[in-house]
Structures are given as structure tokens and as C-alpha cells.
Amino acid sequence: SPDSVSAEPAAAVDKRPKGTLYRDEVDSMVDGGLGRFLQRVEVEAALDNGKFKGFRILTLYPPSFWQDVDLKPGDVVTRVNGMPIERETQAYDAFVALKKSNELRVSYLRGARRRPLVYKIGARPGG
């Protein structure tokens, strides 16, 4: 039917391709500040024999924001785009660098396994 055909393109436009972030969303998040972003995640320092290993995720909220992101409580984020995040200034630098990067790469541990989370950052179609 004509109704189902016209509804499909709108759904396709609203649905972001998997593994993609839109440049305008990333820039808006960075412009909002690291403190504002950190309101969406509760973390604590994860230490291994007193040495900083990364930030352990305690809570992600709201769940809808993190819906398609393969991170969960207990994961330990170790680097962002290859940059260390141990000190506040390092975390800030990694966050701000996203405005100039064409990808977001989060290195993290789930248990003892190192895992990458990679998103391409590109222009919104038609934008």
C-alpha cells in the first residue's frame, strides 16, 4: 500500500547506521562540556595493585542514550582514541579531540578481555 511505502524512508532517515555517530551530535556533546557528558555515566577509578587501570562503569543513564552502545556496568574504560584518561586534563583533552576526529574509539576491558568500541563520525545524510 502507498502508506507503508511512504513510512519506510522516514524510518530509514531516523535510524542511524550501526557504528556511526553524526558530526553535529558529537560537536553538540563536546560543546556541552565534559561535565555534562559525565552526568550520563557514573564511574570509579579501577586500580590494579594500586596502579590506575581505567574507569569502571557503575551506571549508564538514561538507558535510552546508551541503547546501542556495547558498554555496561563493570566494564573498565582504559583509553579514548588512543589517549590516556587517567588525569582529568587527559580525559578532557580526549573528549575535546573528538571535534577533530573522524572516529570515536573506546578501549575497554570486559573482565580480562580487551575490547574496542569504534564509531565512525560523519555528516548526517542530507545535512
Image (cartoon, helix red, strand yellow):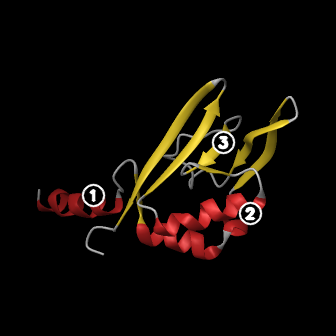
Amino acid under disc 2: Thr
Query: Which circle, 3 or 1, is nearer the viewer?
Result: 3
Q: In the rendered image, which residue does mark 3 sit on? A: 78
Instruction: Specify the quadrant of the image occupied by residue 44.
Output: top right
Task: Work out whether residue 118 or residue 97 is closer to the camera in this orientation and state it.
Answer: 97
Quick check: 71 above or below 102?
above
**Residue at the (57%, 69%) spot, across then down:** 29
Instruction: Specify the quadrant of the image occupied by residue 22.
Output: bottom left
Residue farthest to the left?
1
Residue 80 lies, in percent from the top left, at 59, 51
Res. 101 in view: yes
Q: The C terminus is located in which quarter?
A: bottom left
Residue farthest to the right?
50
Q: In the rendered image, which residue does mark 2 sit on? A: 89
Q: Secondary structure at mark 1?
A: helix
Q: Secondary structure at mark 2?
A: helix
Amino acid under disc 3: Thr
Residue 109 lies, in percent from the top left, at 63, 32
> Crowdedness of circle 3 by 10 Å Cα count: few (<14), some, many (20+)?
many
- For residue 65, the mark is none
* Left-right relation of 124 to 24: left
- For residue 12, the mark is 1
> Crowdedness of circle 1 by 10 Å Cα count: few (<14), some, many (20+)?
few
CA gap, disc 3 and disc 1: 34 Å
**Residue at the (59%, 68%) spot, across then down:** 96
* Left-right relation of 31 to 2: right
Query: Which circle, 2 or 1, is nearer the viewer?
Result: 2
